């Protein structure tokens, strides 16, 4: 561990092409200088991430982000209201951009966002470069919401982990595709469809039938080791239970409650940590109680469905 100010050390490592894990309000990111091809290639290697899955690039301010992409009036409007915050915008790359093409993974678009976390903000201000940052987990696994999670998932493959405590939102950012005329919600998150609809007229939800737009949104994702069973009505002693609300199902071997009061914000913040904790226990499967499909519940259920999806490599052929 380097002595002195960890932000200065982290910024220096980034400028040398090294990998730094950093906290954001959503989840921890695995950062590299987005303009350095070799550094960005290092992210794919450390995560075991398929090269066809593009990366979100993080910026210190809207002006810096707007330089690298075609930042239209829709983007300006959303940035004004939601940045810094848990919203990533997919936009056409500016032909002059310095962002490594690897970040776009062969697409002509680039996802950009301004995180709202003091450590991420300090790092971005201090390093002076855009920072490519997927979630700091091994590809296909649960996103980390603490420095300890990053250590457990990527450990020695990261040059420095900045510890900013638990991530307050706990779910990855909302991903909105503005690269064509029709806005498209590619990943639900803490900025909800209702909120986005207050700013934009028509938003299509989900992938289209054409070429894969957001390869990270393959069905199986965010997956614990153990099978995940949704909408549990009963539970056995050899199962772990992820409960929600004041009345957890009786009979589970171990129970963790996302929110006893039924608060969706609290549930989102606890989701990944609880899934990890139940996954490392000795139970046959993880049963999950129903979560309301409203507001933040939409993003929570999206992640739970992916955690429960069959882990079949053939899904690529099935889905697309
Ligand atoms: O909250 C977050 O977004 C976190 C923090 C660290 O910022 N990052 C994150 O990155 O979740 P990642 O790489 O784990 O997820 C990014 C998602 C993936 O589903 C990816 O396929 C999609 O965004 N994505 C990235 N660039 C894209 C693009 N140009 N077009 C379509 N989808 C894109
Ligand atoms: Mg991820």
Image: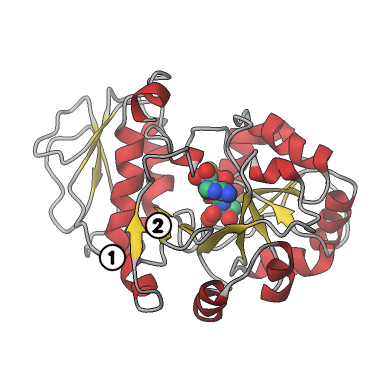
Q: Nearer the viewer, residue 237 or 43?
A: 43
Q: Nearer the viewer, residue 180 or 131?
A: 180
Q: Is the residue under label 1 in contact with that under label 2 (CB below 8 Å)?
A: no
Place residue 125 in its image quadrant.
bottom right
- Quarter that holds the C terminus: top left
- Mark 1 highlights which residue? 295
Say whether residue 27 is visible. Answer: no
Residue found at x 81% / y 60%:
129
Q: Position of residue 90 (x, y in %)?
A: 55, 57
Vertical arrangement, residue 227 with respect to residue 100, above or below: above
Say whether disc 2 or disc 1 marks the residue closer to the N-terminus.
Answer: 2
Residue 16 falls left or right of residue 282? right
Q: Secondary structure at mark 1?
A: loop
Label 2 environment density (alpha carbons within 10 Å; few <14, some 14–19, many ≥20): many
Label 1 environment density (alpha carbons within 10 Å; few <14, some 14–19, many ≥20): some
Residue 290 falls left or right of residue 125? left
């Amino acid at each position: 561990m380097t002595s002195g100010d960890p932000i200065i050390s982290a910024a220096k490592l980034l400028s040398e092409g090294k990998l730094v894990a950093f906290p954001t309000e959503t989840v921890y990111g695995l950062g590299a200088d987005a303009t350095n091809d070799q550094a960005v290639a290092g992210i794919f290697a450390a995560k075991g991430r398929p090269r066809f899955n593009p990366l979100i690039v993080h910026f210190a301010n809207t002006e810096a982000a707007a330089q690298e992409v075609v930042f239209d009036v829709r983007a300006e409007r959303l940035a004004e209201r939601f940045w810094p915050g848990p919203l990533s915008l997919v936009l056409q790359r500016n032909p002059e951009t310095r962002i490594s093409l690897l970040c776009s993974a062969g697409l002509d678009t680039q996802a950009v966002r301004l995180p709202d976390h003091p450590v991420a903000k300090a790092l971005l201000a201090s390093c002076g470069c855009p920072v490519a940052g997927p979630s700091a987990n091994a590809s296909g696994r649960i996103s980390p919401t603490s420095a300890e999670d990053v250590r457990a998932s990527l450990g020695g493959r990261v040059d420095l982990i900045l510890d900013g405590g638990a991530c307050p939102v706990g779910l990855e950012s909302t991903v909105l595709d503005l690269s064509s005329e029709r806005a498209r919600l590619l990943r639900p998150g803490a900025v909800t469809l209702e909120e986005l609809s207050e700013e934009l007229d028509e938003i299509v939800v989900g992938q289209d039938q054409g070429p894969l737009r957001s390869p990270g949104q393959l069905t199986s994702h965010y997956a614990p080791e153990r099978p995940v069973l949704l909408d549990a009505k009963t539970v056995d002693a050899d199962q772990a239970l992820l409960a929600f609300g004041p009345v957890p199902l009786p009979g589970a071997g171990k129970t963790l409650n996302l929110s006893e009061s039924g608060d969706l914000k609290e549930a989102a913040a606890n989701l990944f940590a609880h899934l990890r904790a139940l996954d490392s226990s000795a139970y046959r499967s993880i049963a999950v109680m129903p979560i309301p499909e409203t507001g933040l519940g939409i993003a929570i259920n999206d992640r739970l469905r992916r955690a429960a999806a069959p882990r079949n490599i053939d899904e690529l052929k099935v889905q697309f």
